[in-house]
Amino acid sequence: MNNQVFKLIDGDFLPQDAKEVLVKLFLNKIQFHEMKNFSTNERSGEDDLVAIKRIPELKESLAKIKYVLESENAIGKRVTIKTYVEISLND
């Protein structure tokens, strides 16, 4: 199977709507990694190193997104968001 690409978000939003969409997306991903780390820790007594590394990266991106979309520069503007998910099966 070749790589498959799926459109997740493709549109123009008011800044507050863009913020809502992106905050929910990032918080969901952060929660996923927190639960994954918790589960791994409960089973093995060790942290999930991928999750531990990814959580602060996601939190930093989220803070930057909030900063941009809450800034004075965003007032009266439209925000274009385009996100895609690419899936490839690897051996």
Image (tube, grey):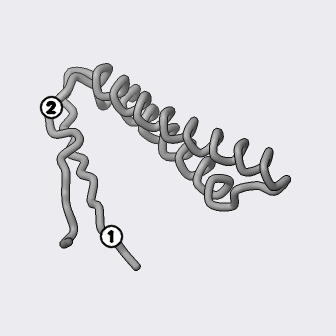
Does label 1 or label 2 sit earlier along the sequence?
2
Q: Quadrant of the C terminus?
A: bottom left
Q: Residue at 64% of width from left, 58% of height from top? A: 53
Work out how far the residue at label 1 is from the one at label 2, CA to CA, in angstroms: 32 Å
Q: Residues within 10 Å of mark 2 (few under 14, many from 20)?
A: some
- Give above or below for 1 relative to 8: below
Question: In the drawing, does residue 83 fall left or right of residue 44?
Answer: left
- Expressed as whole percent of the image width and height from the top left, the position of residue 43 reads 78, 49
The spot of residue 1 in percent (x, y) is: 20, 71
Q: Which residue is mark 2?
A: 12
Residue at the spot of label 1: 89
Q: Residue at x 85, y 53 (%)?
A: 45
| Position of residue 19 measured from the top left corner of the image (x, y, whole percent) | 36, 27
- Secondary structure state at the residue bearing disc 2: strand
Residue 29 can be seen in this image: yes
Left/right of residue 59 with respect to residue 11 in the rendered view? right
| Residue drawn at 36 percent across, 23 percent down | 20
Q: Residue furthest left?
A: 11
Q: Given the image, on which type of amino acid does mark 2 rest? A: Asp
**Nearest to the observer: residue 66 or residue 10:** 10
Residue 18 image-quadrant placement: top left
Name the kind of residue labelled 1 in the image: Leu
Of the residues tagged 1 and 2, which is closer to the observer? 1
Q: Residues within 10 Å of mark 1 (few under 14, many from 20)?
A: few
- Quick one: SS at disc 1? loop
